[in-house]
Image (cartoon, rainbow, N blue to C red):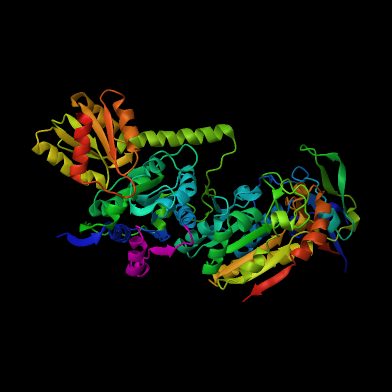
Amino acid sequence: MDLKDIIKPENRVYAKTPVLTENVMHYCPGCSHGTVHKIIAEVIEEMGIQEKTIGISPVGCSVFAYNYVDIDWQQAAHGRAPAVATATKRLFPDKYVFTYQGDGDLASIGTAEIMHACNRGENIVVIFINNAIYGMTGGQMAPTTLIGMKTSTSPYGRSEELHGNPLKITELIAQLDGTCFVTRQSVQTAAAARKTKRAIRKAFENSGQSKGTSFVEVVSACNSGWKLSPVKANEWMVENMFPQYPLGDIKDR
Amino acid sequence: MALRGAIVVDSEKCKGCSVCLVNCPTNTIALAKEVNSKGYNFAYMAYPENCTGCTNCATVCPDTCITVYRVKV
Amino acid sequence: MAEHILMKGNEAIAISAIRNGCDGYFGYPITPQSEVMETLMEEKPWETTGMVVLQAESETSSINMLYGGASCGKKVMTSSSSPGLSLMCEGLSYLAGAELPCVVVNVVRGGPGLGTIQPGQGDYFQACKGGGHGDYKMVVLAPSSAQEMYDFVDLGFDLAFKYLNPVLILADGVVGQMMEKVELKPMKPRWSDEFIKSTFKWATTGKTPDRKQNVITSLALDAAVHERLNHKLQLKYKQMQQEDVRFETFMCDDAEHVIVAYGCMARICENTVELARAEGIKLGLLRPITLFPFPTEEINRLVPQLKTMMSVELSAGQMVEDVRLAVNGRVPVNFFGRLGGIVPSPEEVFEAFKKEIK
């Protein structure tokens, strides 16, 4: 069978969703952000909610998420996305509102905002990218940086004594009565990415049913920040990040 | 019944991260020796006869530059 | 016949918000303005007009809730007092940078730090000269009565949406706490989502196939683009100075001396003017209603007939700098202020005035 017989529109089983723009992403090669953006765009397309979805982008590498997912966006101050989303959802209750935040944004400077939005049970979706480092500012220590992990502000490795411990914020979030769905996923393999997509879809469906806050952490690789190749970074993530941040649903009600 | 597949890589968008390579169960994909205009060795279907159109490569591709086709033969 | 109700300035803010079609109030308790949110919660406007009222976890959060609500083209507001406004400065800078409309009320108390819960006017610099980072300005309205607290919510929203910029109502503990008769103006309904969608094309109302996505942001990494954005903002601030300066004068026509005072101090200084007039001194009062844009032109117009001017404030001397800039050395500009929440009497101001002109 010739390739030209296979490569025909009627045989297409996977193509870029039109909810993603044509812009080439500014992310480093192999960055998990791109995969998660794509998953969100695919969920929006499959649910047919492009006209009803408003995204809140953070400060960090994904500040430019609005360049890639073709919906209305609000770019929030560092850490404040959950507060921004709170008002947006309350004033537009029929919209799907989600925040997209990194570990520095969500688990450090924005700890108060995320805790209280989740505790109030705002009917929003939170996508939390945890790659244990500040990517955009050049690889500084994050609240989720592992013990022993070297970053530009923990050049000798994170020490419990000097820097404190990695923050398992997702477990804390799961304790809050306002959350209905709290899960931790990853996107380094096709199977993992498909599970993440199911989780994100469920989160958006929960939002439509006003069940409370849905929180999806995606343990991610920052290969530039970690100073590894994209493939090696994913391997390192599986070996080192997953023991500290185990995958799976923490809460589902 | 067997599945035959094929992928089309947007070689200008591809950054050569290789995540698709390691996720391909049939060793269909390799990085090209030549580079695109950004200087990346882009992914391409090196062994077309292996491809089953499973979509694993496209699913993990952070830059969404792979389109997948599949036929039953 | 219009309805008149006796109420506190803070209550007037709350009632006015409900009656003027405000979509959302987000706040955090702080003395001396907690009555604003208390009144709103008691009134339950979500059952009548559909207005959202939410107690946030901090002032940082409330101002960012305004960012979200304003991005949707909704009429949103918050209120706080001095330390709370310090926390909001980050958000105000973002709101100004992203060109979003909102109304923020500061019922000023004494600072710095935790300061005192007594009235103050020490936040003039913060309100008029920035506070947050970057080259931005807000329209700053200074009410001196409960009626103006009521009226300026409506005016504030008009100006906020005219300029797509935050409007700050710079009140003080006296104006917030004192009870006065307030005339309730006719109700204005909230805007419908359809109206917002068709009127505010920039708002994040959901991307429809007939338009490009709307993105609310203050970020522009390209230097040329960012400079253009700043120039656009500066043009807007210039337009405010041309079109929206507001002030009131009292006995200025034949005045040889003029006191400049705003908020509660303007009320007190009116009596000082009367004391002076009783002694044959030709004293007048200029009350800036907008602190930014400042009534520089009016001061310019008055200077040729004057021997002195005097700024009277509940601060160590903040507005006096703008008076001096306007006067530009042509006549002496004196200053009298009290701190710590002490509000001077008309007599005390008069004594201070007489000492300066001796």
Number of numbered discs on residues: 0
Vertical arrangement, residue C149 with respect to residue A194, above or below: above
Q: Where, by quadrant of the figure, is residue A187 drawn?
A: bottom right
Q: Residue at x 17, y 41 (%)?
A: C272
Residue C122 picture location, percent across and down: 36, 44
Horizontal side, residue C36 vs residue C68: left or right: left
Most foreground residue, C113 or C36: C113
Q: Where, by quadrant of the figure, is residue A118 drawn?
A: bottom right
Can see residue C243?
yes
Most foreground residue, A12 or B59: B59
**Quarter of the image with the N terminus of chain C in it:** bottom left
Residue A168 picture location, percent across and down: 68, 64
Magenta run includes residue A25? no
Vertical arrangement, residue A16 with respect to residue C240, above or below: below
Residue C356 picture location, percent across and down: 23, 31
Most foreground residue, C9 or A22: C9
- Please give the range of residues in magenta: C32-58
